[in-house]
Image (cartoon, rainbow, N blue to C red):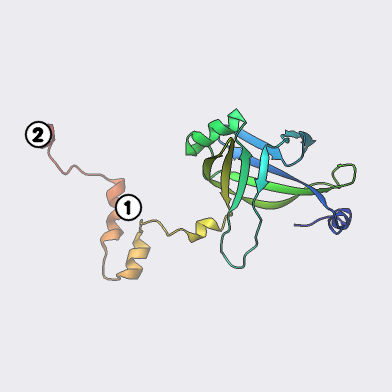
């Protein structure tokens, strides 16, 4: 993340006011939220504030290809967010999420333009109730998360040849798929 000289000076002060902007690309449209105490206009869009994002877990940076999740706690009082949380996973899972950061001056105005500080994909949503308070936690992963998963169980001819050089069964696979043949007679299939 690259910050301007004015932003760096503000971040070095003992008391730092910061606003975070989070964009979730849901299947039904883009959700734009901020940690500011009121809606804020930025980048040609209105970013919902006033507690839409209750908290953001700590962003950690790891060496190598390890992945660390980022949890966004959203306001369960918003009916649209609650419907999203209990709805189908296709609405959010595997779709992109992005977070920007911008320091604020003493009058709560943005210093410069917000900078991207995190990117990833939405993974899982959990809804919790604690007493009379509810929360929606949206777990997001970085792109390194896909590297942790085991490869699919599919194989191709080159992989099979590498493991078993004498086996030629996969060499005929593309021809079998391209030219299907009838294995059972029509009379047998009609039974």
Left or right: where does residue 126 sit relative to residue 74? left
Q: Residue at x 62, y 43 (%)?
A: 73
Q: Quadrant of the N terminus?
A: bottom right
User: Which of these two is toward me, 152 or 14?
Assistant: 14
Quadrant of the rendered structure where residue 151 is? bottom left
Q: Residues within 10 Å of mark 2 (few under 14, many from 20)?
A: few
Task: Assign a secondary structure to mark 2.
Answer: helix
User: Which of these two is toward me, 10 or 145?
Assistant: 10
Q: Quadrant of the C terminus?
A: top left
Which residue, as the protein is rendered here, is positioned at the far top? 79
84 vs 141: above or below: above
User: Which of these two is toward me, 166 or 36?
Assistant: 36
Task: Assign a secondary structure to mark 1.
Answer: helix
Tag 2 residue: 187
Quadrant of the rendered structure where residue 52 is? top right
Tag 1 residue: 174
Q: Residue at x 67, y 42 (%)?
A: 54
Left or right: where does residue 104 sit relative to residue 94? right
Left or right: where does residue 67 sit relative to residue 32? left
Q: x and y percent of residue 109 in the render? A: 86, 42
Q: x and y percent of residue 122 in the render? A: 56, 46
Q: x and y percent of residue 105 in the render? A: 88, 47
Q: Earlier in the sequence, mark 2 or mark 1?
A: 1
């Amino acid at each position: 993340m690259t910050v301007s000289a004015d932003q760096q000076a503000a971040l070095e002060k003992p008391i730092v006011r910061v606003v975070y902007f989070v964009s979730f690309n849901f299947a039904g449209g883009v959700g734009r939220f901020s940690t500011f105490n009121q809606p804020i206009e930025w980048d040609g869009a209105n970013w919902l504030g006033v507690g839409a994002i209750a908290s953001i877990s700590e962003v950690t940076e790891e060496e190598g290809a390890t992945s660390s999740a980022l949890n966004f706690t959203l306001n369960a009082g918003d009916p649209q967010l609650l419907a999203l949380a209990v709805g189908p996973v296709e609405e959010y899972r595997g779709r992109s999420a992005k977070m920007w950061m911008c320091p604020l001056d003493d009058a709560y105005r943005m210093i410069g333009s917000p900078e991207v500080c995190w990117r990833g994909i939405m993974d899982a949503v959990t809804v919790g109730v604690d007493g009379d308070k509810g929360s929606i936690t949206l777990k997001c992963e970085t792109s390194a998360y896909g590297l942790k998963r085991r490869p699919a169980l599919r194989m191709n001819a080159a992989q099979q040849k590498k493991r078993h050089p004498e086996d030629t069964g996969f060499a005929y696979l593309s021809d079998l798929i391209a030219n299907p043949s009838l294995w059972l007679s029509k009379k047998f299939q009609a039974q």
